[in-house]
Image (cartoon, coloured by chain):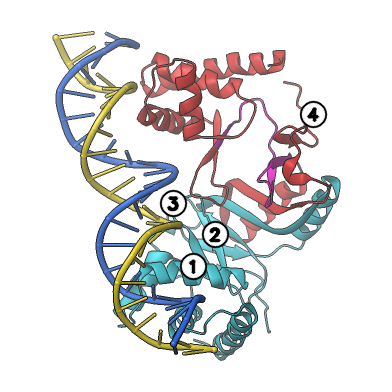
Chain colours: A cyan, B red, C blue, D yellow
DNA sequence: TTGAGTGCAAACTTTTTGCAATGTT
DNA sequence: AACATTGCAAAAAGTTTGCACTCAA
């Protein structure tokens, strides 16, 4: 975990604290433990991966609490929820990370990320034309890696980032 | 149903026939009945809506067959499957209809459509940069209608189309 | 103290699967 | 006639809910 990652976790904790206080919700250890686990992970994850991962670390959490807490974290924008075409919701931490979209390999299911400012302008234009206030979007490119051995490469990180010049 | 819609249905039946013959699959009445039902509908639908709708018309189909047939139709590109953020897959007919993306009202869940050629060029560029052969994408804008009474307007069609100059 | 939040298990929803019956080729 | 496909019902997969207990405020 990089220093930036750690800073993001600390900042995220502050945001969560403020959010909970503001909403009159309780600052339970479970909520912070789940937040920490998420900000310590590097990749996209689903509810069960997170749950199992915490169980393995001897945390005492139930699936219901994981679901509840993820709702809270999504609501305060610390976590983003994705429905990547399957019936399994995927999540990813979002504080301190640049807005990005996804590219998913239909062979190996690797998730990559990219940024393109034109999407923002399309969003603005379409919103205006259709009288919609667009507040977020989801753009996913599905395809196959053209490099050899896409499916079996374990030497590349699960999530690659293009143009991730985020410096907080 | 317009004449264009009818033509699309006829063309779709031919495509399905060719596909089934090519794959050595059987041309069962259920498959054509489901195709016809889909091309007769005007909107997006989920498995249960389609199933109920066919039951009401006294077709004899089971949910399993609807699921199986939808897989076939998606595979031969006559139907597109969407996972609009919920755990309920939505489908829509796709033959003879221009490529488009979606805008979903987070208040009333109305689905609108739009086209923008820039998405294609972003797709090409990103694919090249990340060494991916992108073969399809999903772009959804989420937002709220800025016109009054968005939630309750029944006078607008469920699916609005912008730039739908399809003449097929 | 007290009720929001938790763990657990049961319920629910959507999709998939097993199997005997059916009907296309 | 052979076997892919169907209907049905049961199972699976993912998520939500009910309830008694716990602990943050």
Residue B97 falls inside the magenta stretch: yes
**Can you identify the residue that label 4 sits on?**
B165
The residue located at (67%, 18%) in the rendering is B5
The residue located at (50%, 58%) in the rendering is A147
Chain ID, mark 4: B
Chain ID, mark 2: A
Between the residue at mark 4 and the residue at mark 1, the CA separation in whole angstroms equals 39 Å
Give the mark, 1 or 2, whose residue is nearer the N terminus. 1
Is A90 drawn above or below residue B16 in the view shown?
below
Residue B129 seen anywhere in this rendered image of the structure: yes
Q: Secondary structure at mark 2?
A: strand
Asked if labels 2 and 1 touch by Cβ distance under 8 angstroms, the answer is yes
**Label 3 environment density (alpha carbons within 10 Å; few <14, some 14–19, many ≥20):** few
Task: Report how many numbered discs are placed on residues in the image.
Answer: 4
Q: What is the magenta range? A: B91-113
Q: Nearer the viewer, residue A3 or D6?
A: D6
Is B105 drawn above or below residue B61 in the view shown?
below
Residue A158 seen anywhere in this rendered image of the structure: no
Chain ID, mark 1: A
**Can you identify the residue that label 3 sits on?**
A107
Q: Secondary structure at mark 1?
A: loop
Question: Which is in the foreground here, disc 1 or disc 3?
Answer: 1
Between the residue at mark 4 and the residue at mark 2, the CA separation in whole angstroms equals 32 Å
Q: Quadrant of the C terminus of chain A?
A: bottom right
In x, y percent, where is residue A41?
Answer: 46, 77
In x, y percent, where is residue A141?
Answer: 59, 52
Decide if residue A128 is on the left or right side of residue A45: right
Asked if labels 2 and 4 touch by Cβ distance under 8 angstroms, the answer is no
Q: Nearer the viewer, residue A131 or B20?
A: A131
Between the residue at mark 1 and the residue at mark 3, the CA separation in whole angstroms equals 17 Å
Q: Do the residues marked 1 and 2 share a common chain? A: yes
């Amino acid at each position: 975990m990089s220093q930036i990652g750690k800073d993001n976790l600390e900042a995220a904790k502050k945001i969560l604290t403020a959010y909970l206080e503001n909403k009159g919700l309780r600052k339970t250890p479970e909520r912070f433990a789940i937040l920490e686990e998420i900000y310590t992970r590097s990749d996209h994850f689903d509810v069960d991966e997170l749950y199992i991962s915490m169980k393995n670390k001897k945390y005492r959490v139930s699936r219901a609490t994981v679901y509840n807490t993820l709702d809270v974290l999504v609501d305060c924008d610390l976590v983003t929820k994705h429905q990547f075409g399957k019936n399994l919701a995927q999540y990813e931490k979002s504080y301190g990370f640049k807005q990005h979209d996804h590219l998913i390999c239909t062979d190996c299911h690797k998730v990559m990320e990219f940024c393109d400012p034109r999407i923002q302008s399309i969003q603005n234009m379409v919103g205006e034309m259709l009288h919609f206030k667009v507040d977020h979007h989801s753009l996913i490119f599905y395809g196959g890696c053209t490099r050899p051995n896409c499916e079996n490469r374990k030497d590349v990180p699960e999530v690659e980032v293009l143009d991730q010049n985020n410096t907080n």
